[in-house]
Amino acid sequence: MNGFMGRRGCALASTLAALALAGTAAADPAPSFAQLLRRAAETPRVTALEADVAQAEGLAAQGGVRPNPTISVYGENFSGSSPYGGFGRTETTLQLNQPIELGGKRAARIAAGRASVAAAQASGHAGRLAYAYDLARAYGAAEVAIGRIALAQDEVEEATAILSVARALVSAGKEARLRQLQAETEVDAMQAMLEQAKAESVAALAHLAALAGSETSWTALSESLLDRLDARPRSGPVDPMQEAGYRAAEARREAAAQRVTVERTRAVPDLNAQIGVRRLEADNATALVAGVSLPLHVFDSNRGNIAAAQAELRAAEARAAAARLEAQAQARAAQGLVDATDRRAAAAKRTMATAEETYRLARVAYEAGKSPLIELLNARHGLGAARAVVLDAAAARLEARATFARLSGTTITGEPVQ
């Protein structure tokens, strides 16, 4: 057991994960967190965000296009009864028709297109921040899962060592057979915990691979993200009005407002100007023809589309208000949560140190025959619980840092997200 105490001189959860990583050197490790972030543009999730922006840009470009003219050719006064039999009195007209938009339709479409592009860009920025947040959580979850394997392996090792001592004491007549059976039960229980930890690690690594867009899963990590949490996050309060989710909601609200304007302009009738040349066969002459047509909005005044756009705007305004309240609440809690999880991690370290010393003393006393096996088992349970507390504290700390980073517009490692 002295070997165990030497390995566990440091009680940090990141050390537990590092031990697990060192044991899987021959495995297929995931790239570092920074490398995965650099590859974000290759993932389906971020690719979809970029495609949304490209779609909005295409629609915006189309919105600024003027309506196409049309050319028509038609003939009159031929192949009828006398005197219009044959083609001698035919009148042939070549005409150009040009729709003329009124009411500021094109300007409204251009403004709406620009607002839609801005909304797509803001949503894309928020989406990339959310991806960096989820990636950090997934990477941390995989590291914690690997750390739990290290914990379970040590639990099995310790339980097996206790079983060996119990067998020796039973053989020497210093312990009842019941104590050996208890120790054997503990070994079986710890082995089951180890298998469960391995299964959870496989699931966590598979989730990380899927999020990173990898076709194959990984079996290890190439770095410890938990080790990087000792660096303090960017100081200063978070401005909720600059939070990416709220800004995206505001951009979508503005885009919805512009669409209301577009639908209102569509209620204004458009002119259709016509100009052409007419050939008069009977007189062997040509003449110009011109005209203007204006539709009468007797049945369709676009009221349904206007009402739908106004309802969309009300919904966007409500979502923006909800996003503002959520951003304000998260901003108020962000720094406090970081501080609280830091204190929790420090307390977990102290708990770990106490549990290690308690277990060491219980082991010495048991091997000397001065305390029963039940006290040693209790001390070992306490040590296992303390190790789990350290990992849980590290996971909570990572969650708090990732949330703070997302609200600040950066990754958990401090890089800005464009």
Image: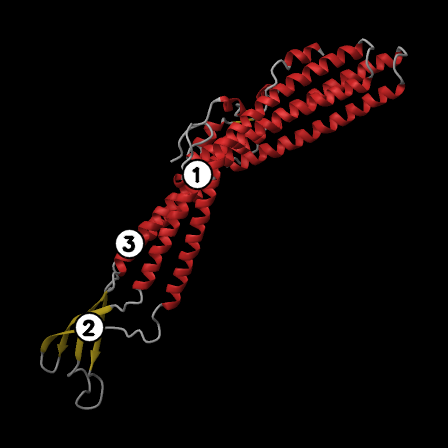
Q: Earlier in the sequence, mark 3 or mark 1?
A: 3
Q: What secondary structure is found at the residue carrying circle 3? A: helix
Q: Quadrant of residue 1?
A: top right
Disc 1: CA contacts within 10 A as few (<14), some (14-19) or many (>=20): many
Kind of residue sitting beneath label 2: Val
Q: Which residue is at the front of the view, 106 or 333?
A: 333
Kind of residue sitting beneath label 3: Ile
Q: Which residue is mark 1?
A: 128
In front: label 3 or label 2: 3
Q: Which residue is mark 2?
A: 292
In front: label 2 or label 1: 1
Please say if 135 is above or below 254.
Answer: above
Q: Earlier in the sequence, mark 3 or mark 2?
A: 3
Q: What secondary structure is found at the residue carrying circle 1? A: helix
Q: From mark 3 to mark 1, how far is it between C-alphas?
A: 27 Å
The colour scheme of the drawn protein is: secondary structure
- The image shows residue 393 at horizontal and vertical percentages of 59, 27
The residue shown at (21%, 78%) is 75
Q: Which residue is mark 3?
A: 110
Disc 2: CA contacts within 10 A as few (<14), some (14-19) or many (>=20): few
